[in-house]
Image (spheres, grey):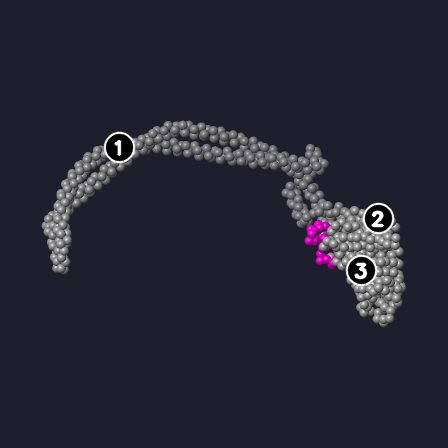
Amino acid sequence: MQLKHIKLSGFKSFVDPTKISFPTNMVGVVGPNGCGKSNVIDAVRWVLGELSAKNLRGDSMVDVIFNGSEQRKPSGQCSIELLFDNSNASIGGEYASFNEVSIKRIMTRDAQSDYYINNTKCRRKDVQDIFLGTGLGPSSYAIIEQGMVSKLVSSKPDELRTHIEEAAGVSKYKERRKETESRIKRTKENLSRVKDIKDEINRLIKRLESQAKAAEKYNKLKEQKSDLELEKAILFSMEAKNNRDNLQKKLDGLNRDLEIKNTELETIQSQIDQFKTQNESVLNEYEIAQKKFYSLGAEIAKREANLQNILKTDSENKSNLEKVIESYNKIKESEKNFDELSPREQAMHILDEIIFIINSNKITSENIDKKASQLKELLTEILNIASEQSKTLSDEYLSRQSQLELQIKDAKKLKETLEIEMEDYASKTSDSESVLISLRKKQSIFNEELRKFENQKSITNLDARSISENISNVRVELNTYEINLQNSNKKINDAGLDIETIDYSKYQNLSLKDIEDKINEIETKIIKLGAINLAAPEEIETESKRKEELDEQYNDLTEALEKLTSAIKKIDKETRTLFEKSFNSVNDKLKEMFPKLFGGGYAELALVEENAIDSGVILMARPPGKKNSSIAQLSGGEKALTALALVFAIFELNPAPFCLLDEVDAPLDDINTLRFINMVEEMSKTVQFIFITHNKVSMERSDHLMGVTMQEAGVSRLVSVDVNQALELAET
């Protein structure tokens, strides 16, 4: 199996679709630092199922997608495809018939990854299963990146053991063991579940057995009850026939009584109707008399109101007259006092005093004297006017007094007239009231007679209603007897007995009450039994069959568990044997390879625990001319050669389809580089080597060179050179 080419698109710096072909077994990848050479190895690791972003030199998995540059936008996804030559059927299984096998992985910005084998979507596990035991994988010994050299030689014993196991093909056994352990776990879980179900079924069967016993008692009691109910039905049938006839007679008598009462009701109703007809004329007369009485009352009330108004007006006129006379007298009295007091002289005197006061205060002014004189004249005029007004007011009071006296006289006449009319209306009212009293007595007699008839009607109605209720009750009772009789007859027929041929004499000594008491007693026993599961016997049979099936499953699972446990032991034995054989083989090859690379010296592998099945592996190396054997004391170049010796020893045991080396020759001098490349050239006969290098010696010995450049910032491009063709051209 050989890697034919890699197709990259959108992966890290390889933004454009790029195809990297590997036509020979010694392909060198060269280029300046930072141009994207290591991205080729990262691409192989990623497509083989790497899940750690750290191992791909990123912070997150989406960092493998081209993140853009100054001139380019970020890519939405990336894809890597590896094409393998499978003409020798190294990839077995369902892909053994394919000459070429394609492994592809696509991832989008949302970190969604899809895997494909020959363009058919698959799982990551399917990809890893193809390369189990081949040395290929995301963390295999076939991919040695920068820093992996020192990591390999400084690996922990368990990690170093993993590389040897991968070369030995133990990974297949481990995968089988892992699957077997998983099956054991599932089998134990199933075994536990089956056991729990078995226990539960056992408990259920015990409960069902108890329920079955209760169901048996229940069925016996039900049979006893059915027998008693049959006897009850026969007795009831006997009694029901007699009771039904008696009830029918009673019903006929009640119907006759009801007819009599209905006839009495019709007679009473006829009398009531006759009385109502007679009473209607009296009521009409009463209404007419009542209307007349109320009309006279209204007229009297009207006259009384007029009389009251007249009396009120007369009283008011008298009061007003008294007030007018009083006011007139007051005016006369005031005029008399006024004349006696001589207000004019008093005013003049006051003015003189004012003038005197002003003069005494030596206030001399012609204007004051003038004004005072004018004031005297004005007061004189005012007093004259007041005197004239007093005379006018006196005349008005006298006129008003005369008018009031005339109104009082008219009111007396009207009062006398109304009193005469009131006496006439009072007489008419008395006659009308007498008529009303007479009609009321007549109506009262009619009402009394009507109440008697209504009472009689009510009593008769109550009697009729009582009879009707009795009829209904008898009919209900009769219907009940009919239904019960039908039910009884049905029970008798269901029991296979003929009603017409039953010998009722056998049952004459039985008591219906005794039978009912026995039935009640049986029902009490049934109630005490509680909830009854009549299907318990069938359920017991079903659960017993289920238990048998579970027992078989339990036995099968126990047997399977024993087989799986035995398989684990067998796998462990085979794994141990295979590992020991492979360990010894790798150790022998290491002892052979190490001196070739170092020009002498000694290296070997050792187990941490000699007899332990999972013992770790330690690496010891002693370069020529040195006494130390600790890996930690070696220089960078010595560590690199030691790691390469170990890798080449592993490859001798189980050559991987290809080996990826990322600048592993960087710490080597020219002599060690020459030794390294000689060994690579020798092993390239069976193994495909793809190595990244800056070393001229390595470049010169390569069959094919792949140049990686970055003319555009952040974007890697590829240049392919066939070294052999170039040498041939140079020679010609």
User: In terms of depth relative to the viewer, which is nearer, 302 or 154?
Assistant: 154
Within 10 Å of disc 1 (Cα), the crowding (few <14, some 14-19, many 20+) is some
Q: Is residue 479 positioned above or below 371 on the image?
A: above
The quadrant in which residue 183 appears is bottom right
Q: Mark 3 points at which residue?
A: 694
Amino acid type shown at disc 1 = Tyr
The reply to whether dot 1 and dot 3 touch (C-beta < 8 Å) is: no
- In this figure, which residue is indicated by the disc labeled 1? 425
Q: Can residue 497 be seen in this view?
A: yes
**Residue receiving disc 2:** 100
Q: Where is residue 386 in the image (x, y as percent from the top left)?
A: 14, 46
Q: On screen, 723 above or below 278?
A: below
**x 39%, y 29%: residue:** 279
Q: Magenta region: which residues?
A: 54-79
Q: Which mark is residue 475?
A: none
Establish if 192 lies above or below 484. below
Give yes or no for residue 461 being in the magenta stretch: no
Q: Is residue 73 magenta?
A: yes
Nearer-the-camera pick, 620 or 700: 700
Q: Which of 448 and 252 is in front in this view?
A: 448
Dot 3 crowding, Cα within 10 Å, few <14, some 14–19, many 20+:
some
Marks 2/1: CA–CA distance: 142 Å
Dot 2 amino acid type: Glu
Residue 544 can be seen in this image: no
Determine whether the residue tagged by mark 1 lies in a helix, strand or loop. Answer: helix
Q: Is 222 placed left or right of 679 in the picture?
A: left
Identify which residue, 432 or 682, lies in the foreground.
Answer: 682
Q: Where is residue 51 in the image (x, y as percent from the top left)?
A: 75, 56
- Helix, strand or loop under label 3: loop
Q: Nearer the viewer, mark 1 or mark 3?
A: 3
Q: Characterize the local packing of mark 2: few (<14), some (14-19) or many (20 or more) Cα atoms within 10 angstroms.
A: some
